[in-house]
Each structure stands twice: as structure tokens, then as C-alpha cells.
Image: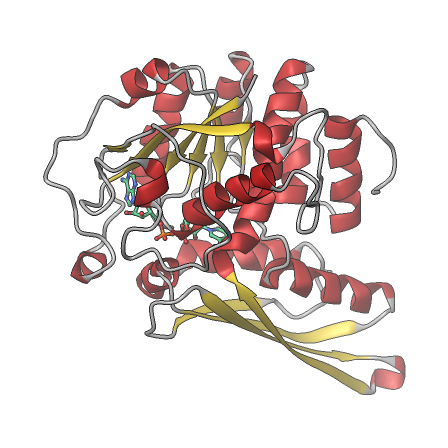
Amino acid sequence: MPIRVAIVGVGNCAKSLVEGIGFYTQNPAESVGLMHPHIGRFLPSDITFVAAFDIDARKVGKPLHKAINAKPNKTMKIGSSLKYPTIVQRGPTYDSVIPQLREYFIYESKSPAIDLVKALQQSKVQIVVNYLPTGSDKATYAYAEAALNANCSFINCMPTPIAKDPKWRKRFEDKGLVLLGDDIKSQCGATIVNRALLHLLKIRGIKITKSDQTNYGGNADHFNLHYRPQAKEESKEHALKSSLTSTDAHPHARMIYTEKNYDHKQAKIKIEGKIWGKAPVSIDLTLEDEDSPNSAGVVVDAIRAIQKMTQSKKVKQAPEICAFLFKSPPKQYSDDRALERFNQIVQGRKGPF
Ligand SMILES: NC(=O)c1ccc[n+]([C@@H]2O[C@H](COP(=O)([O-])OP(=O)(O)OC[C@H]3O[C@@H](n4cnc5c(N)ncnc54)[C@H](O)[C@@H]3O)[C@@H](O)[C@H]2O)c1
């Protein structure tokens, strides 16, 4: 039986996820780029998209496989998408659009918003993936509420604190559903690379005197983050701080919009510290990546992990697997420990590999 997924926000991350599922379905022997080719018995090809919601007139009313290519989506093409009968429906707007986004990145549809609960129930959705612009707190809570009322699990890919909130977690748990979040930790993005470097320095006895991360990007997400950076910067700093001790310098993360609509991202990481005899050491590193495929490579595991945990009645352990997949989980672990817990709970095996 396929895993029935709904997408909230048919932007660049959604395009990478949908095209990626097409790619791994059409190339079943391909395992490059997958953190877990199998999760339980589930393959990426077991995922199907049965509902999608957006508010942009260029996407609403179109089949999902066409809407992912509508402007302003700009991320690289992974392959041709599978053809879905799923039509993008007009969701409610709430606080998801700031005035600056209306200039190019979102042309709000004039159609009325649909009834979310009814739409999720009619499409027999099992899992809702939330890809709303960062800062859309009210909209995120509304979609999460609808997911609960329609008996769907929920993956929060952006920083609004929801999986981190014990009250929200309990509401999902009580219904036998899974809530995962918050804010996807990309497969090989600035956060995980920066965490690995800080961890390395700490296990080698180094005091960190400076930890700066500057992210340059030109997509719709970065444009939005130019005006609403706070939640993302806090989420990144939270992820980095957990690798440090209280005597280390506070880590700083910044988001810079590069004024080109493209998905290529550059992150500059600068760390300074003191080694033996307080002698100085410093690291300057540049990470270049495609932003949206980098997040899809993690969401594909989150979706299959939910299906596995629901079937094996392990929904109460959901908070523990968040540390592997998200920047701001309910509880932070080191990345090795997080993978170990993920594998124990979801894959039923010991050890990280
Ligand atoms: N590597 C990554 O790209 C990455 C990593 C971690 C987290 N995230 C987060 O994931 C989210 C999605 O990123 P993206 O690059 O796809 O952004 P995007 O701007 O390309 O896509 C957002 C989509 O949401 C739609 N939308 C806006 N308001 C809506 C509403 N009320 N209902 C339904 N749809 C609505 C927009 O029209 C757009 O299609 C962002 O919050 C981002 O910070 C991304």
C-alpha cells in the first residue's frame, strides 16, 4: 500500500521531493543520495502525493506535477516527475505572506480557501508535509489542527515550534499519530557540517572563541528570510549551541538574500578557538549546495519513518527520532547518537550503520 502524503506549500522543496520520488521510482536500483534506501520495507517509490495546497495563482488549480514547475520555483530539475491526478487546492493564507513577497514570489489566488479537513479526508491523506514560508506561525498551526482533525500525521519542515511543544505532541500521540519537527536539518547543509566541525573541536579539547555561519541564497525562501530571519537564525543557533559548552562563544547564524532567483546556496563557516597553551586555531570553510534537494533527502526518510512507527505502534518514540532529521527537535543529541536512536527505533537495529 502506498504512503499517502499531502504537501502544504508547493515551492522549491516540494519540487525536489516530488521529482526525487519520480527519480528513485524510475531508477529502483539507484541508492546514491539516499540516507536509508529502505526504511523497514518502505522504499521511496512507496510514497505517493494525493493532495497539495498552495495560495499562489500560478500553482492553484494545476496538477501537482505541473505546479512544481510554475514560477517562482527555480530549483534544479532532478528528473521528470511522475504524473499525479492530484490538483493543487487553494489553502487558507493566515500570516504566510508578507507584503514584500507579493512583488514576485507569491501572487495570491483570488479563489476562496477550501475546507482543509474535508480535503484531507476525501483524499485519504496519512501524512501532511508542511513547507510553508518561515514565519507562518498561524498558518502552520491551522494546517496542523486540520491534520489532527483528519487523523493525519504531520511533518513540520520549518521552524515554527510545534514538535517542540509537548502539548501539540500529546495531541498527536493520543490519536496514535506522529508529529515530527521542527525545521528540516538538510542532508549535507550548513547546520550539520557546522555541528560536525564544532563536535570535532570539542572532542579535541578546544575552546571555541568564535563560531559564525553566514548563509547566502537567492530563492524564495531566502527572500522571505531576508525579512523574517529570526526563527531560522534561532533554530540554527539552537542546533549549534547543543554541540558547545557554556564556556564557548555563542554561535551566530545569519541569512543573506543574494538578489538572484536561483536555488544555489553558499554557506561560509568561520570558527576560531584555542588549542594547547592557548595557541590560536581557525577554520574557514565554504559549503556550496543546491538548497532544496538537500532538504528532500531528509523528508523522504521522515515520511517513511512515520509509516513504520505508526505500523509498529511506536508513536510515543517520535520525539527521539526528530534529532536525526530536524534542527530544532524536542531533544538534541549528537549526530552519531541521533542516527543510532533513529536506527534503533525505526530500523530495529543497533549501531549507527
Ligand atoms: N534546504 C532547504 O531548502 C530547507 C531546509 C530547512 C527548512 N526549510 C524550510 O522549508 C520551507 C519551504 O521552503 P521552500 O524553499 O520550498 O520555500 P518556497 O518559498 O519555495 O515555497 C513555499 C510555498 O508555500 C506556498 N504558500 C505560502 N503560503 C501558503 C499557505 N498559507 N498555504 C499553502 N501554501 C502556501 C508558497 O506559494 C510557495 O509555493 C521554508 O520555511 C524553509 O525555511 C528549507
**Closer to the camera in the image, 13 or 179:** 13
Color theme of the render = secondary structure
Picture coordinates of residue 244, whole percent (x, y):
71, 61
Q: How many marks?
A: 0
Quadrant (top left/top right/bottom left/bottom right) for the C terminus: top right
Residue farthest to the bottom, as pictured: 279
Quadrant (top left/top right/bottom left/bottom right) for the N terminus: top right
Instruction: Work out whether 218 lies above or below 231.
Output: below
Residue at position x 52%, y 34% in the image: 163
Residue farthest to the left, as pictured: 110
Residue at position x 69%, y 60% in the image: 195
Residue 9 can be seen in this image: no
**Closer to the camera in the image, 21 or 303:** 21
> Would residue 262 be found to the left or right of residue 178 on screen?
left
User: What is the quadrant of residue 35 in the picture?
Assistant: top right
Instruction: Work out whether 4 lies above or below 189.
Output: above
> Would residue 24 be found to the left or right of residue 152 on screen?
right
Residue at position x 52%, y 67% in the image: 253
Instruction: Work out whether 44 lies above or below 134.
Output: above
Picture coordinates of residue 313, whole percent (x, y):
66, 14
User: What is the quadrant of residue 190 in the picture?
Assistant: bottom right
Residue 174 can be seen in this image: yes
**Closer to the camera in the image, 165 or 343:** 343
